[in-house]
Amino acid sequence: MDDNMMERQIADYMVKYGTENTNYGMWSFEVDELTEKFGVTKQWVQEHSDGILSELYLRQEVEDVERQFGGSDFHLENIFIWYFTDFCPNYIEDEQEKDDGVDQYWFAPTCWCTDDVIEAAKRNGIVLTPQQAEQWWQKNEKWFKDTLTEYGNEILFNANFSEV
């Protein structure tokens, strides 16, 4: 089987398995799992990850894809796939989506990821790996959320409501 066909076959598996098994619209595939299932080496997956991702992005079920690298040799460890939830039969809606009778909704949800931490650190002259950025988030996420909420409330309290 040629490389392009194998990349497509792996992507097909990742879409089928992920959409059938996720409860929340995302599934993570370990490189070890893919090497075992498809009889390829870790090096092959590393070298063909761009092709696999390209195949994934061609699929209507796939919203986004992210690679996670790790180890001292910065090798590919995981591939995370976010699916459009319309394609996920086991998707469990969050409380706000589930309750059609709600009379209050949350506004302005905002998210950051490890890439944001890496970029912010770089602007301060510090180089972080994705693993270090994830560790930073795990250690500081509560502080970050609390601080963000505090600043958000301050902005909201000083907002001009006369233009409603």
Image: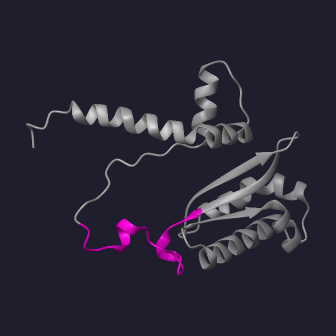
Foreground residue among 45 and 109: 109
Residue 136, how many percent across, how many down?
A: 65, 37
Q: In this view, does 132 lie to the left or right of 63?
A: right
* Left or right, 120 with reference to 147: right
Identity of the residue drawn at 9% across and 38% down:
163
Asked whether, in this view, residue 48 is left or right of residue 27, the answer is: right
Q: What stretch is highlighted in magenta?
A: 82-102
Q: Could you say where residue 102 lies in the image, as x and y percent from the top left?
A: 26, 68
In which quadrant is the N terminus drawn? bottom right
Q: Judge whether residue 93 is colored magenta.
A: yes
Nearer to us in this view, 55 or 162: 162
Task: Return the x and y of residue 155 as percentages of the image width and height.
Answer: 28, 32
> The C terminus is located in which quarter?
top left
* Residue 92 lies within the magenta run: yes
Is 127 left, or right, of 107 in this rendering?
right
Q: Which of the pair 108/66 is nearer the observer?
A: 108
